[in-house]
Image: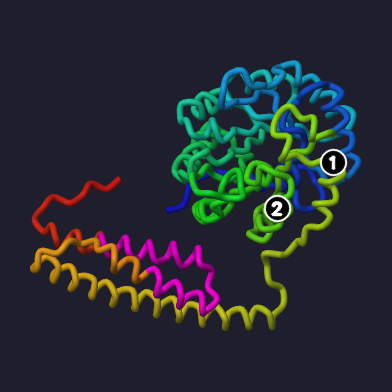
Amino acid sequence: MKLALHISPLNSWLPSCEQPPLIAGPCSAETEEQVLGTARLLAKSGRVAILRAGIWKPRTRPGEFEGVGSIGLNWLMKAKVQTGLPTAVEVAKAQHVEEALKAGVDILWVGARSTVNPFTVQEIADALKGVDVPVLVKNPVNPDLSLWCGALERINHAGITKLAAIHRGFSSFEKSPFRNEPMWELAIQLKTLAPELPIFNDPSHICGNRELIPYIAQKALDLDMQGLMIESHLDPAQAWTDAKQQLTPIALDELIGNLTLRSPEVKNAEFEDNLVKLRAQIDQIDDQIIQTMAERMKLVEKIGEYKRDNGVTIFQLSRWDEIIHKRSDFAKALNLEMSFVGKLLELIHGESIRKQTEIMNEGVPPEPKS
C-alpha cells in the first residue's frame, strides 16, 4: 500500500546547486565566530545548497550541552546574509517552530528523537498549519518504518507539501563499526511506499566518525538518494558535540568532489537490452527459490507431524548446529557473504519452527500476532 502524500517536487523548493544537493554545517551552533567562519568556508566551496546548525540539542543525559538556544538563530541569519545560503535547523516543539520561522529560517527538520514520539510530531505539525516551509523528517531512533511514515503523514496533513525524509540510521544492539546501523532496506521500503518522496542521507549520524563517511555517502548516492546532510565544523577537534563525526569545510569539499555520480535512468539501448536479459534470468532463479522453499516447508510439516506423533520436541540443538556448519561451509565455498547466509538460515529456521509449532499445537488458540 502506497503512502498518500501530497508532495511538491524537490526542484520546486530546493535552491539550484551542484549535485548531489548538500546540506552542511556544524552539529551545534557554539559561538557567532564559529558559525560565521564555518558558513563562509562552506559557501566558498560552491557545493553546499543549505546551511545547517543545531540550535536546540536534545541530549541523552542532563547536564550535557543542549545548544545555545534562540541566540544562535541570530548567528545563523547573519551567516545567511553574508553567504546567501538558505538555512535549516532542527525543531522539537511548537516554540522552536515559532522562533525559527520568526527569525527567517528557511527549512526545518524533525529529529530522530522527535519522530519516535507521535505526540511531539503532532505538536510540531499543529504549529506548522498555514505555513509554507520545507520540512525534513529524520527516521526514528528505533527501526520502525510505521513511525517514520506516521511522522511524514502528520506533517503532510498539516499542509506541508515541501516534504522530504532524512535517513540517519537506526540504533542497534549488534556490534557494528557504525554509530547507527544504516538498515538500507528500511529506506528502500519507504521509497517504495512513497516513490515521489525525496530522501536525503545523513552519513554523519550513521557513521559516528568521519573516516566512514565517504563510504556511506557513496552508497547512498548509488541507492538513488536525492541528497546528503553532512556535519561540518571549522575546527572539529574543538567541537562541543559530536566532534568525531564532523569534517572541516575543506575535507567536506574534497569528499564531495571524489563521489561518483550515477544516473538512475538508462539511456543506452544496448545496455537496457542486456539489463532486461540479466533481470529475466534473476526472475527465473527467484521463482525457483520460492518453489524450492515451498517444497522444503512441506517436508518441514511432515517432520512436525512425525515429531508430534513420537513425542519429540520441536527444537533440537544438535540438528541446528549441523545445519549451521554444513550450510556455512558450503556457502563459503561458493564465495557467499557469511553474514548474509547466517541471516538467511535463521529466517528459514524460524519459519520451520513456526510451522512445526502449529502442527504440535493443533486445536490450541494461535499465538497473537503483533
- Amino acid at pointer 1: Pro
Q: Is residue 136 left or right of residue 302?
A: right
Quadrant for residue 322, please give it: bottom left
Out of 229 and 235, give the one closest to the viewer: 235
Asked if 71 appears above or below 218 in the picture, the reply is: above
Q: Horizontal and vertical percent for residue 266?
A: 68, 71
Q: Is 341 a magenta residue?
A: yes
Q: State the predominant SS element of the stretch in magenta.
A: helix
Which span of residues is magenta-colored? 324-353
Instruction: Give the residue drawn at x 21%, y 49%.
Output: 367
Gap in angstroms between the C-alphas marked 1 and 2:
16 Å
The residue where tag 1 is placed is 249
Q: Horizontal and vertical percent for residue 211?
A: 73, 49
Out of 142 and 350, give the one closest to the viewer: 350
Q: Within 10 angstroms of label 1, few (less than 14), some, or many (20 or more) residues?
A: many
The residue where tag 2 is placed is 217
Q: Horizontal and vertical percent for residue 135?
A: 63, 35
Q: Horizontal and vertical percent for residue 72?
A: 76, 20
Residue 194 visible here: no
- Amino acid at pointer 2: Ala
